[in-house]
Structures are given as C-alpha cells and as structure tokens.
Amino acid sequence: MKFQPIDLEKWSRRPYFEHYLDRVRCTYSMTANVDITLLREQLKRNGVKLYPALIHMIATAVNRHPEFRTCFDAEGRLGVWETMSPSFTIFHEADNTFSSLWAPYSEAFAAFYDRWQQQVGKYKDAKQLFPCTDEPPNTFPISSIPWVHFTGFNLNIYGDGAYLLPIFTMGKYERQGGKLLLPVSAQLHHAVCDGYHAGVLFKALQELASDCRSWLSGL
C-alpha cells in the first residue's frame, strides 16, 4: 500500500478543496439504481454469491479513479492511496447484529472472492463490531440493507467533517420492467468529489455490471 501526498501548490483542485473543506464543509449523498440483471444471471450460473461480487464491483470503480481514494493519512497529510481495499458488513441473524470485516482487493475477481470467503468463514460467528485487528488504513466502507429497496439514503456523520473517502450502502434489489435494479447510495465529500465525479462513479458501476462476463471469466 502506497500513499502519495498531494502538493496543494500544484493541485488544480485546490480552490474547490479549500472552499468545501474550510468555508462550506459538506458531504452529499446520491442514490441510483444499477441494473444487475445480467450480473445476477451469470453469478447464479457459476454458483457465486452476489454480495461479494457487488463489493468487488464497487472496489474496482473506486480503484479506477483517484478522486475516490483521496483522503488524509494518519499524519494528517492530504494524498491518494495507490490502491484501496473494501471493508464490508456481515449480518448475524442470531441476534440481528453485524460485524465489519475487510478483504484485500484484487482486480481478479476469483482471487478477491477467495479472500472474501476466507474472511467471512473466519469471522461469521464473531460477536464484535470490528473483529479484524489487522485492517489497514487504505480501506473504505461498504454496507448493505437488503430488506429495503430505497430511493434515497443519507448518513449523518458528525465530528470534524474531514472524512473524505466515499461510503457505500446497497439496498434490496427489485425487478422492474424486466430488469433487476439494485439501489446503491454513495456518500461523498464535496471537497474531493463534485457531481461530475458522482456521475463517473455510477457510470463505472453500470458498465462493470453490464460487462460482468469479462471479469467473471476467471471463475
């Protein structure tokens, strides 16, 4: 994992960053449906779970665009992680609680799927919020609310408002007009991501879902 500091003096985004961090500090959320019809069919054909495929899909989009990997490191430096891995929640039906795990990202889905299975198998009975003690700093959060097909989702995050990484929440997929639609919400910090970048993100997710045959070919 490599962190590349940003030179503010040479950064073209500096005016926007300073405005939305220092003067009008704000985050925003955007929810859009992703058509996962073909993806779901391909996964069922291969006997592969949907949730890790969606996690991998989101992580791939994040790793393709530096805006979604921009943050402060432990020393307070602004910069970009070379790669990021997803942290994700798993649900415990016995007591309706959840745990947050993580798995190292790999562009090859088969490799990531194996790592996801290992983590879930290891911690599936954990009764802790954060059972993993080795989570690195270059992770970003993903969670799922598979009981509700929502049209909007917003996180109210308190603190100093300097958490710059995206936060993803998925809902319940539903069939509409012959398509299987999954609501995906992205919470973004305006200091590093504008509406344009949100559009880039959701376009990338849809392209990955539609082109799933290529990245599922290694299974």
Image (cartoon, helix red, strand yellow):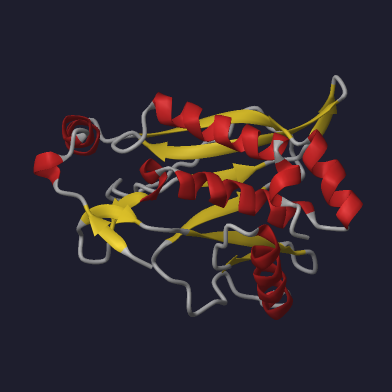
Q: Position of residue 119 (x, y in %)?
A: 66, 74
Q: Is residue 215 left or right of residue 201?
A: right
Q: Give the residue drawn at x 28%, y 36%.
A: 191
Q: Position of residue 179 (x, y in %)?
A: 82, 27
Q: Is residue 133 above or below residue 104?
A: below
Q: Residue furthest left?
A: 9
Q: Is residue 119 left or right of residue 174?
A: left
Q: Is residue 93 above or below residue 151?
A: below
Say which quarter of the image contains residue 111: bottom right
Q: Residue furthest right?
A: 45
Q: Is residue 75 above or below residue 214?
A: below
Q: Position of residue 103 (x, y in %)?
A: 58, 68
Q: In which quadrant will I find the C terminus?
A: bottom right
Q: Is residue 218 left or right of residue 69?
A: right
Q: Give the residue drawn at x 70%, y 70%.
A: 114
Counting labels gives 0
Q: Position of residue 52 (x, y in %)?
A: 70, 57
Q: In which quadrant will I find the N terminus?
A: bottom left
Q: Give the residue drawn at x 51%, y 55%.
A: 141
Q: Give the residue drawn at x 64%, y 33%.
A: 206
Q: Is residue 10 above or below residue 122?
A: above
Q: Residue furthest top?
A: 177
